[in-house]
Image: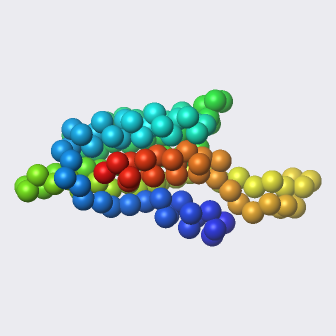
Amino acid sequence: MAAIDEKIAALNFHVTTQRTPDQVAQLIADAAEVSGSAGPKTTLTRVAAHQFNGVMKNFARVQMAEFTVTLQPASDGRTAVQLSIGDYLRTRDTLFYFIPITPWGAPGYKALASFSDYLRNKL
């Protein structure tokens, strides 16, 4: 399980940008749309003025990942953006229900990577 955990952990980031919190909020919404084209549907909820919670679900509404994007505006006009990926679904193929034949994987990894890369590159 360590390999997929390391891949998911590499998607987390903390970046400071010149963009305003409103511009960053729009980029977060755009990243959710882009990641939706990779498979799971991404739903964003603004839980505070500077915090967004996201959930990725597949077509059967099975939750594949959850994440939080936090904005911290500074007095100099810059904005600190942090992406933290919380819980995510791990799977692996088995033979006869108990013999593992593949390493652990995350079905939502591609969509998470798409979201993280888009947001990080646009900031």
Residue 69, percent across and down? Answer: 35, 48
Please say if 72 is above or below 26. Answer: below
Side (left or right) of 40 relative to 9:
right
The residue under the point 92% across, 53% down is: 96
Task: Say how the picture is coloured.
Answer: rainbow
Residue 24, percent across and down? Answer: 27, 43
Please say if 58 is above or below 78. Answer: above
* Residue 78, visible in the rendered structure: yes
Side (left or right) of 3 relative to 29:
right
In the orientation shown, which residue stands out farthest toward the right?
Answer: 96
Residue 120, percent across and down? Answer: 38, 53
* Residue 57, visible in the rendered structure: no
In the orientation shown, which residue stands out farthest toward the left?
Answer: 75
The residue under the point 30% across, 36% down is: 26
Residue 107, percent across and down? Answer: 65, 47
Quarter of the N terminus within the rendering: bottom right
Side (left or right) of 59 relative to 111:
right
